[in-house]
Amino acid sequence: MNNDNPNIIFNPLISSIQKVVLYETRSRLYLVGSNNRETRFRFLTIDRLALNRLSIEENANEFNSSDIRRFVSSLSGSPKVTSAYGVLGFVRFLEGYYLILVTKRKCCAHIGMHLIYTIKDTVMVRVNEVTSQRPPHPHEERYKRIFQNIDLRSNFYFSYSYDLTRTLQYNESAPRYVGTKVDLERDEPLPDWNKLTNNVAQAHERVDYAFRSDSRKRFVWNAYLLQPMEGLMLKDWLLDVTHGYVSQSCFSIYGRHVNVCLIARRSSRFAGTRFLKRGANFQGDVANEVETEQIVSDGQRLCAFTQMRGSIPSHWSQDISKMVPKPPIQLDICDPFAQTPSRHFERLLFHYGAPLIMLNLVNKRERRKHESIISKELENSIVYLNQFLPPLHHMKHIHFDMARHSRQSGGNVMEQLAVHAESIIQQTGMFYKARRGSELSLQTGIVRTNCVDCLDRTNSAQFAIGKCALGHQLERLGFVKSAKLEFDSDCVTMLEHLYEEHGDTLALQYGGSQLVHRIKTYRKTAAWASQGNDVMQTLSRYYSNTFSDTEKQQSINLFLGLYKPSFARLNQPIWELQTDYDMHNAFVPSTSSAPITDWVRHKVRECLPYSCADSNKLVKELFRVHSNGLEMIDSYSNYHQSFKWTDLSEHIEFEISQLATRFMPTFRTNYSPFQRQIQTSRKARQNPSMTGQSSTSSTNSNSSSDEGDDSSSDEELSTSLAEKEAKQAEAAEPAPFTLSAILPAMEEVYGCSISTPSKQNMSIYKKYVQMAKLSSGGAQLAKTAVAQREHEQAKMLRGVTLRPLGDYGTDTYLSVKPPTVPANSLRIYKEYCNMPRNFNAVPKFEEFDLLYQYVQRLAKPAPVRPPPPSESAC
């Protein structure tokens, strides 16, 4: 994007700080950072004697390994040494600062040659030395415990060479602005890359540029922790960490591996727990906002599709003072001009372009208004704001009552969602990039899915959209002719497992439990026994929301820097605050003089339907490099790490291929990943399902609820499904549980079947076995006499003439007849044994004669015998 010249290549900078060693002394902390090869080193010195302040001194020089050895040897005493893989930042509560390091990491995915790591362990080191003049503050340890409630070992990710906070489409775009503070409305962009001569000798000469990406702070969860380090000259010390979900799997297309990576980025704005964070704040940041990107790659080409979820952008909440399963929904602030939704939608238009498609899954018709309150608010906001947009770029609203359609007679939710998903993919498209100079396609717009919680129904709908997107991605890559993929095939089963883990992880982060209603629940293929698990997850979510969400919200506010402890607030520590409303709804005076009807900036409107962010990419640094083999941009060496020994089992490609095997069936009739692999029932064979309704499910699923009852929601779906399956179990006769019922026939798998042999074949086989027993002879001699053995052998071989091709002797494991050794060989071996063994020592004088005779005998040619006399001579 922004660059059609195949000779200009933009390479992201690879961090030169990938390993960190901390040396602790009583007066100072020394941070020694090195590259992956451990050949280049940098220094940070932190003064521990500075009271309640952070003093960081950076050494601008670069050191080698010998300099580091001299430095370590110069340290007095025995300093404590801690090895790490990055610095998360610094945090301060009431007394002094703490340093947070990543001590364990694990590679979990890769995008091209860029590795993605997940944090497995961290350490928190006190920076300022505690003085004995005054006792520590009593609240210090409690703040520290609240801070450490954020488990950094779970679902936090980073990369040394890839910007995880941005989409693949943005990362592959050409830079247009350079700097940290850029005004898109006033500043001039860089010249057009397609018109630059680049000062090259030849017209088609390759030109490489290196750039440092500007992270999207919305998805950087340690931005507050990195603030004390922003003044450092070397920006490689800053390690941006995202929160959400990252996983990768693969499937094989007749030996060719295709990788599927799922990246979910959770927003750090208006972040919190289920009932404590609903709707949106005044800046347009919504609760439970997650951007999900699905990337498909075959090793050379990349194809990506992005979608998102988030709460309805209005000021609404639920009263949790009463312990009820479904607290009533109420609108807190009336917003007649939709100012809060306009800020939210304007940000989506800036980052993703048009069209914006809102897939609304909440209940539409209810006896007593509950979910329909916020649904009506969203619909009215879209209708009002569309008045001020060009008709071509109007926002689209799709209201799909998922719970109602699931309860209807014969309602197949996945089939109906597939229709909407196909329409969405056709409108937004997807990002595709192959080799340099080849065709490039872009995604314009995004689908935004929501229900009330943005958990269960939303995840199933996102899977339906992701399944449709996967079909189009594989079609674009040339692997399939049709974009429709069958359920229960290898590729869809793999994708379903990814979205199940994706939904469970996001549900635990926001709701406190795993998914209550899974994809199989809406496909109506979930076993009746799984209803018990749904009940347990419902109870777990209810317990978490009631008893532990408040403390979890306090930890998030403290970790993100929304609440900063100080001595001035001793009367109101964070655990005594009644609400955190002012933290997430800070008043920011507007500096714009534009009317509220002009809610889309002129720069954003100019770029539509394309993304303004992608068309005007911002980078922190940009410079030309004269060799693509430099370590700072050599992604090949950074990925393969050819400079060190690597165990194959630890390589990311091997782990991904092993992870994919658990999705594959133990038996199969074909090896295509696009055909259904699960065997159907023998009593009722049906065609492979293309719509989400499993072929093994009953076709007589009737709904017991009438059409007028529209008040049930997600929480009542498990009960209705349990009643249906109970009625089906009573009506159906139990089938016998046999191996033939659960395993396929041998003829289906191997193309042959086992049958009873005929009498003629059995007689031939018996003779063959008897021949094998008698032909060995060694073991038979110990049981029968030689005459009896010969008699039986002659009787069996009557009329059969066997001519052996060679004599293999009669040796067995019981007895071995030694071979006959010629006398000449025995004599030579005997003389060899009589010779001295130590040939390295100088032989004695009396041994020379014996050694000389032995060598002469070996070198003497054999005597030639005269030919026999011929008949003519006689």
Image: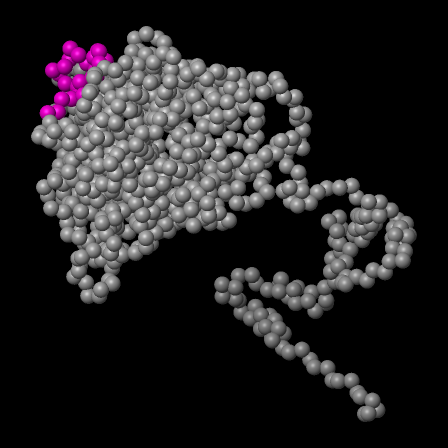
- Residue 669 or residue 229, whichever sits in front: 669
* Image quadrant assignment for residue 609: top left
Residue 552 drawn at (x, y percent): 29, 19
Residue depicted at 15% across the width and 45% down the height: 178
* Image quadrant assignment for residue 394: top left
* Image quadrant assignment for residue 249: top left
Residue 295 drawn at (x, y percent): 36, 41
Residue 371 drawn at (x, y percent): 34, 17
Residue depicted at 77% across the width and 63% down the height: 805
Quarter of the figure with the C terminus: bottom right
- Residue 151 or residue 454, whichever sits in front: 454
Q: Is residue 283 visible?
A: yes
Q: Magenta segment, principal secondary structure?
A: loop
Q: Is residue 276 above or below residue 104?
A: above
- Is 700 on the left-hand or right-hand side of 578? right
Residue depicted at 52% across the width and 27% down the height: 525
- Residue 611 or residue 117, whichever sits in front: 611
- In the current view of this chain or complex, which residue is farthest to the bottom? 873
How many labels sit on residues? 0
Bounds of the magenta span?
564-589
Q: Is residue 587 magenta?
A: yes
